[in-house]
Structures are given as structure tokens and as C-alpha cells.
Amino acid sequence: MMRAIQDFFSFSDPNVRNVLLGTILLSTSSAMIGALALLKRKTLISDAIAHAVLPGTCLAFFLTGEKNSIWLIIGAFITGWLASIAIDQITAHSKIKQDAAIAIVASVAFGFGSFLLSILQHSGQANQGGLKSFLLGSAATLLREDVVVLLWLSCIIILVLCLFFKEFMVIAFDRLFAKSIGLPVKKMDFLFTSLMVLAIVIGIRAVGVVLMSAMLITPATTARFWTANISYIMLLAILIALFASLSGTYISYIIPSMPTGPWIVLIMSLIAYLSFLVFWYGRIFKRNR
């Protein structure tokens, strides 16, 4: 056991370095986006976007014929953004409520993506192998070039969030006040949605479209049990995501048959459940004092 721990934390294995760095970058950017998405009540939209990136990934492969990370990210980003627009348009121009619109867009997009994926798998193309990993993710197969792309895009997300953190906060709390003081509310909404789509897109290779929304929602929701301060929520969400990423990567290292992404989400969910129990029993204890 100690030998395995020493080998893991020595980072001598390049595969361990790639997986750990990739999941750490992903968890940090996702946790920051998730905290603001929770405040702006856009957590459910992130789930629809996560399902909508699958057809974009498949279409990008159809058009280029190769699994180049950049092209796949561009394709996924476009369909993710289209899903967000579709939800807004359905809600604005019909009597359908937002939660129903989210369900419609998510199911249609995921169904279309699964259809395209099935066609690709039966196309006979030799280089289509591994595309199915975008469903549930395959962090263990991250290559150095994947991590480099992940590094740059994660840094962009984190930098933009830090630069416009106050503006995002003001708009989330009071849109009318934000407009009255001259903030470009629509442009800031566009920017935040773009960052959220980008955060989801860069994570599908590691955890897949099915579990990516959990990477955004779970850490922030868990942190909310412990504090109401948005800055502390974001910080705690990052720490939870980092711990889950480290633990999930370690488990998949010592037990090679175990997938990294699902274990990361499982550990996040366990922390969320324990936090809920502490919060719930704490309220009962206060009432009975």
C-alpha cells in the first residue's frame, strides 16, 4: 500500500502526470463555473449543454475525419451554444417552461448524438475508435497534447472569471441594478454562457457528457451546505473538486480496471451526501435545544 502511494506521488509515470494534471485543471475550472452557475440558477442548463456537445463532437469527426482535440472542441462548443440558444428561444416564444425546455433540448441533442455515434462506429473507419469514450469519459487515455489544450483553455476560463468576478456577481444578484450602473448585462451573459460551454466541452474527454454536469454542479452545491458567502462557496468547491480528482485518479491507479471519471464524481457525491447529513442533523439539533 505504501509502495503504491510512493509511486503515485512520485509522478514518475507520465500517464499519471497527464491524468492528474488534466483532472485538476478540469475540476478547478468546473468548480469556479459551477459556483456562479448555482448563483445564477443555471445549473440545469449545464446538464442540457453537456448532452448537446456529443453531436458536435461526432459532426466534427465527420467533417475532418480525425480525432484532433481542437476540431472536436470547436464542434462541441458550437452545438453546446446552440443548445443554450434553443432553450432560451423555446422559453421566450412558447408557453413551455424552462425546465421542460431543458429536458426537450437535452433529450433531442443526446439522441441525435447517439445516432451519429452509432453511424460512426459502423462506418468501418479505423480512426473512429475511442469516440464512444466521450459518453462516460476516459481520463486514463489523456495524452500530453490533450493536457496542453486543457491547460490553455482552463487558464482562459479561470483568468476571465477572476477579471469579471464582481460584474458576474452584481448581475446575478440584481440585473436591474446592474443595468442602471451601466454594466453590459447581455454581453456579460453571453460571456458567462460561453465560459460555461467551454468548461463543459473541455471535460467531456475526461468524464464524458453523461457525468460532466456533475463536475459543475456537485462541488458548488456541496459547498453551499457549509457557507452562504459566494467567495467561500467557490473556494470550498475548488477544494472539494481537487480532493475528488486526486482520490479518483489514485483509485484508478492502484486498481487499473476502475475508471477515473466516474470515481471522481462518486467521491464528489459522497462528500455532498455527508455534507447534507451534517447540515440536516445540525438543523434538528438546533431546533431541539
Image (cartoon, rainbow, N blue to C red):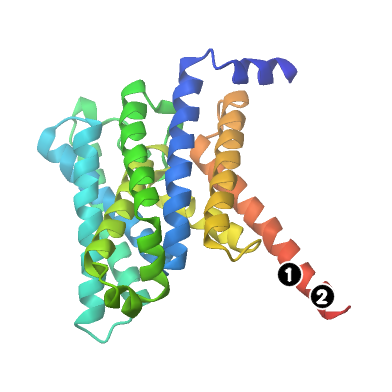
User: Judging from the image, what secondary structure is the residue with disc 1 in?
Assistant: helix
User: Judging from the image, what secondary structure is the residue with disc 2 in?
Assistant: helix
> Which residue is under mark 2?
286
Determine which of the numbered discs, if any, sits on residue 38 in the image. Answer: none
Image height of 170 relative to 268, above or below: below
Q: Give the mark count.
A: 2
Is residue 275 toward the left or the right of residue 12 in the image?
Answer: right
The answer to which image quadrant residue 172 occupies is: bottom left
Task: Tell me the amino acid under the disc marked 1.
Answer: Trp
Nearest the eye: 108 or 151:
151
Is residue 246 toward the left or the right of residue 74 in the image?
Answer: right
Which is more foreground, mark 1 or mark 2? 2
The answer to which image quadrant residue 89 occupies is: bottom left
Q: Residues within 10 Å of mark 1 (few under 14, many from 20)?
A: few
| Residue 232 percent coordinates (x, y) | 58, 56
Nearest the eye: 5 or 108:
5
Residue at horizontal 32 percent and vertical 63 percent from the top: 106
| Residue 7 percent coordinates (x, y) | 62, 15
Query: Residue extending furthest right?
Result: 289
Task: Tell me the amino acid under the disc marked 2.
Answer: Lys
Image height of 39 relative to 218, above or below: below
Query: Residue extending furthest bottom?
Result: 95
Is residue 267 toward the left or the right of residue 41 in the image?
Answer: right
| Residue 249 percent coordinates (x, y) | 55, 31
> Which residue is under mark 1?
280
Q: Residues within 10 Å of mark 2 (few under 14, many from 20)?
A: few
Is residue 66 toward the left or the right of residue 106 in the image?
Answer: left
Cα separation, mark 1 vs mark 2, equals 10 Å
Residue at horizontal 39 percent and vertical 68 percent from the top: 170
Image height of 172 relative to 230, above or below: below
